[in-house]
Amino acid sequence: MKELELKVEGMVCGGCEKRVVNSLSEVQGVSEVIANHQKGTVLVKMTEEIDIEILKEKIEDLGFEVK
């Protein structure tokens, strides 16, 4: 299983984490998403290779910034 950790700015609470998790969980090939607003990270576990731009776009569409 592949893992990718993204640095995400703008998440300030558990609600922000939930929005990111729900959005990324819709992407084909994503098996698990762990968002942590305190660390500013999103860990994406994938069953197949996914273009990072797709993940970044989903997060940025929510109003957060991927570093």
Image: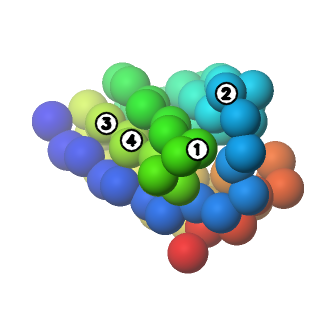
Vertical comparison of 56 with 45: above or below: below
Task: Say which residue label 4 marks.
Answer: 44
Task: Say which residue label 3 marks.
Answer: 45
Whether pointer 3 and pointer 1 mark residues with C-beta atoms closer than 8 Å, the reply is: no
State which tag comes first along the sequence, 3 or 1. 1
Give the residue at x 84% y 56%.
63
Categorize mark 1 by other alpha carbons within 10 Å: few (<14), some (14-19), many (20+): some
* Front-lying residue, 37 or 56: 37
Whether pointer 4 and pointer 3 mark residues with C-beta atoms closer than 8 Å, the reply is: yes
> Splitting the image into 4 quarters, where does residue 37 fall?
top right
Task: Say which residue label 2 marks.
Answer: 14
State which tag comes first along the sequence, 4 or 1. 1
Q: Which mark is residue 37?
A: 1
State which tag comes first along the sequence, 1 or 2. 2
Give the residue at x 49% y 63%.
7
> Gap in Å between the C-alphas at discs 3 and 1?
18 Å
Whether pointer 4 and pointer 1 mark residues with C-beta atoms closer than 8 Å, the reply is: no
> Gap in Å between the C-alphas at discs 4 and 1?
14 Å
Which of pointers 3 and 2 indicates the residue nearer the eye?
2
> Gap in Å between the C-alphas at discs 4 and 2?
17 Å
> Gap in Å between the C-alphas at discs 3 and 2?
19 Å
Q: Identify the amino acid type marked 1.
A: His
Whether pointer 1 and pointer 2 mark residues with C-beta atoms closer than 8 Å, the reply is: yes
Whether pointer 4 and pointer 2 mark residues with C-beta atoms closer than 8 Å, the reply is: no
Left or right? Give the position of 43 relative to 25: left
Pinpoint residue 26: horizontal percent, then vertical percent.
61, 27
Q: Secondary structure at mark 3?
A: strand
